[in-house]
Structures are given as C-alpha cells and as structure tokens.
Image (spheres, grey):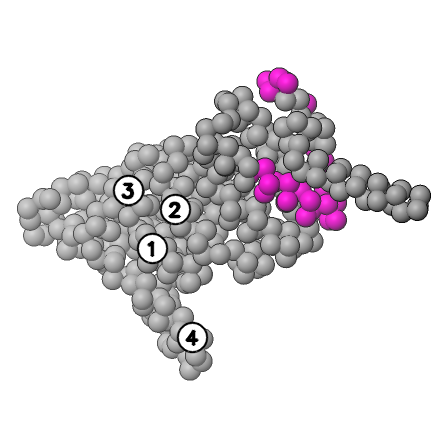
C-alpha cells in the first residue's frame, strides 16, 4: 500500500512539474533566464536545444502565443506584461532558430510539423519583433533545407508575405518578406500562379516609392528572372510528357507576358525605373538590372509609352549616361555590352517618340 501511495505521489509530482513549466511563462521563467521584475534588464541565457527537446519548445511557444493573443484581444495585458511576453517568446524562438541551423535538425523541425505550429499559426502575431524573427526562420529553412521546405510550406504563406510586404511599416520587415519571395518564386510556377491569381503585380510596384534601394534592387532582380523564365517556357518546344504540358498550361494561365502589355503594368514598371534610376549611377551595381528591365519591357510597352514624356525623358537620360565615355571603365567592370544596349535603347526611344499622343 505504501508503495502505491509513493508511486501516485511521484506521478502527481511529474505531471505538476511539466504543467507548471508550460503555464508559468510569466510567473516562473527560470528555464529561459529572463528577469520579468525589470524588463529593461534582461539576462539572456540561450538554451542549446537537443532534438528530444524540440517538441517541448514548440509546445511552449504555441501555448504562449495562443494565451498572449487571447489576452491582447481581451485587453487584459499591460504594456509591461506585453513586453515580457514578447521577450519570452523571442527567447524560445531564438532557441529554435539556433536549432534549425543544422540541416538534420531542420528536417526534424519540418517533419514534426514545426512550420505549421510555429510559422503558419503565428505569422500574423501582433508583435513586430516576433514577426521579424518568424521571417528569419522561414528564410533559414529555405537556406538550410530548401527542397523539404518547398514541399512542406503551404502556398497560403505567400498571401501573408504579400500582406506583410504591403502593410508593414518597417523597411526591414518588407525586405525580409521580399527576400523570401525572391527565393520561393523563381522556377516555381505553382507559387507564381498563386501570387498572380490572388494579388497580381500591383502590390509590388505600388510599394516602390516606400522602399529603400536594397528592396527595389531585389524586386528588379526577381522580376527580370521571372520574365526570362516565362519567355523561355513559352518559347520552347513542348515535350510529349504530361508534366511538360501541364507546366506550360500553368505559365499560360499566369499570362505574365500578356500582362506586360497592359497600361497598369507598363506604367508600374516605369515608376520602378524612375525610382531606382537616381541610385543606379552611384556605383551600387544596379545598372545592369535597370538595363535588363528596359530590355524586358521593350517588346511589350511600345504602345503604352508612345508619346509619354516621362518614358521618353527617362530612357533618354539613361541612354545619355551610357554614352558618357568617362563611365566606360565602370560599364566594363559590370560586363555591360554598351554598344548593344546603346543600339537597343536608341531604337526604343525613337519608336516611342514616333507618334505623339495625349499623355495620361
């Protein structure tokens, strides 16, 4: 009888200890070494997660996130308590981030449905610091385990990334969201189809005036890569396999080439060029991206740009810069074929000057 009582007490103690660890993220944060008495003096003590501790860390993060969301919604957290929760969750997330740096650990995280538990359910959490760290986690997973991540990550995350890119006030957060899309979208026709179907190109060029040079440069690079991808896919001969035919049909459904001829897209891309051009002549190596974009839109935007003083003036300005002999050494360092580009842009300018039209 005494042994039974001891066993019952032992089981009660174990259950109580585990439940206390989960529920005491404010009351008992000893595991993570955080001083909640004074949130301005945090003692950061990283924890080196072991594989068998991953599930506990994910459960702890999710429990805290769910509880915090409810408390924020109910308005029962003070500003100091909100800060405490963010610090605690950031600590747990940093431990997970450190854990997935190892490819084997990243696979374990993804196989344990970590993406759904940590990222999908929390990317909209109303804490800026955590949102930024979650974006870093997505980027890390793409870097460390790209194939598995592309298989596991739900396409709905793209909608959230575009929302963040559009709505977040932080340039760093916008850049991080764009960085993930620049990895995910190229050579992924299914992901591209999702973005074009749900949002189109408008969110990208409408944000240009709010972005810094690194973000604009990334958009230019992404857009040039995807345009080239679509041109190649649409022009190559169809193979007899069902997979090739299905892929081609998806590219056709996206209709990016057809959209390139619309006033909305042409004018949006013209605004991108106008915003980035002042910075493209300062030796930051964005000039080739500008030239590539002009070459890509040239076959499609003739009619839209005809008689448009903004388009004529901008391309003429770029052309004048390319003709400056003092810049030729710089152009050579960029492997830019100045003669070829000069001929192409001269032809472009002459054609859009040809028939003046009412300027919108």
Q: Earlier in the sequence, mark 3 or mark 2?
A: 2
Find out whether residue 51 is within the magenta segment: yes
Residue pointed to by mark 4 = 244
Distance of mark 1 from mark 3, alpha carbons?
16 Å
Distance of mark 3 from mark 2, alpha carbons?
12 Å
Residue pointed to by mark 3 = 206
Residue 266 screen position, x and y as percent = 22, 50
Residue 63 screen position, x and y as percent = 60, 41
CB under 8 Å between discs 2 and 1: yes
The tag on residue 162 is 2
Front of the two marks 2 and 4: 2
Q: Earlier in the sequence, mark 4 or mark 1?
A: 1
Tell me if residue 229 comes above or below residue 237 in the rendering: above
Image quarter for residue 212? top left
The tag on residue 132 is none
Q: Residues within 10 Å of mark 2 (few under 14, many from 20)?
A: many
The residue drawn where x is 42% and y is 32% is: 170
Q: Is residue 261 visible?
A: yes
Tell me if residue 191 comes above or below residue 126 in the rendering: below
Residue 22 screen position, x and y as percent = 67, 38
Find out whether residue 85 is within the magenta segment: no
Q: Earlier in the sequence, mark 3 or mark 4?
A: 3
Q: Is residue 98 visible?
A: no
**Nearest to the observer: residue 102 or residue 66:** 66
């Amino acid at each position: 009888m005494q042994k039974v009582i001891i066993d019952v007490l032992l089981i009660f103690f174990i259950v109580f200890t585990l439940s206390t660890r989960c529920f005491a993220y404010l009351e008992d944060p000893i595991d993570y070494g955080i001083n909640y008495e004074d949130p301005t003096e945090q003692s950061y003590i990283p924890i080196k997660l072991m594989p068998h501790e991953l599930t506990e860390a994910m459960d702890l993060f999710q429990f805290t996130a769910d509880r915090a969301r409810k408390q924020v919604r109910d308005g029962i957290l003070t500003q100091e308590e909100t800060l405490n929760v963010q610090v605690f969750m950031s600590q747990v997330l940093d431990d997970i981030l450190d854990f997935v740096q190892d490819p084997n650990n990243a696979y374990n995280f993804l196989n344990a449905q970590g993406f759904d538990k940590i990222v999908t359910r929390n990317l909209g959490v109303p804490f800026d610091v955590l949102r930024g760290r979650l974006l870093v986690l997505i980027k890390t997973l793409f870097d460390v385990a790209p194939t598995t991540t592309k298989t596991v990550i739900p396409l709905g995350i793209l909608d959230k990334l575009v929302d963040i890119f559009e709505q977040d006030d932080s340039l760093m957060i916008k850049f991080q969201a764009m960085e993930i899309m620049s990895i995910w979208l190229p050579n992924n026709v299914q992901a591209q189809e999702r973005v074009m179907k749900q949002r189109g190109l408008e969110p990208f060029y409408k944000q240009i005036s709010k972005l810094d040079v690194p973000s604009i440069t990334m958009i230019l690079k992404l857009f040039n890569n995807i345009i080239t991808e679509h041109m190649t896919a649409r022009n190559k001969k169809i193979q007899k396999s069902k997979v090739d035919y299905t892929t081609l049909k998806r590219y056709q459904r996206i209709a990016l080439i057809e959209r390139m001829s619309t006033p909305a897209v042409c004018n949006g891309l013209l605004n991108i060029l106008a915003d980035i051009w002042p910075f493209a002549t300062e030796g930051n190596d964005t000039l080739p991206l500008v030239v590539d974009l002009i070459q890509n839109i040239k076959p499609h935007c003739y009619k839209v740009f005809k008689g448009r003083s903004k388009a004529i003036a901008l391309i003429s300005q770029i052309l004048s810069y390319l003709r400056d002999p003092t810049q030729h050494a710089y152009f050579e360092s960029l492997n830019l074929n100045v003669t070829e580009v000069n001929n192409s842009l001269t032809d472009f300018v002459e054609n859009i000057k040809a028939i003046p039209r009412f300027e919108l």
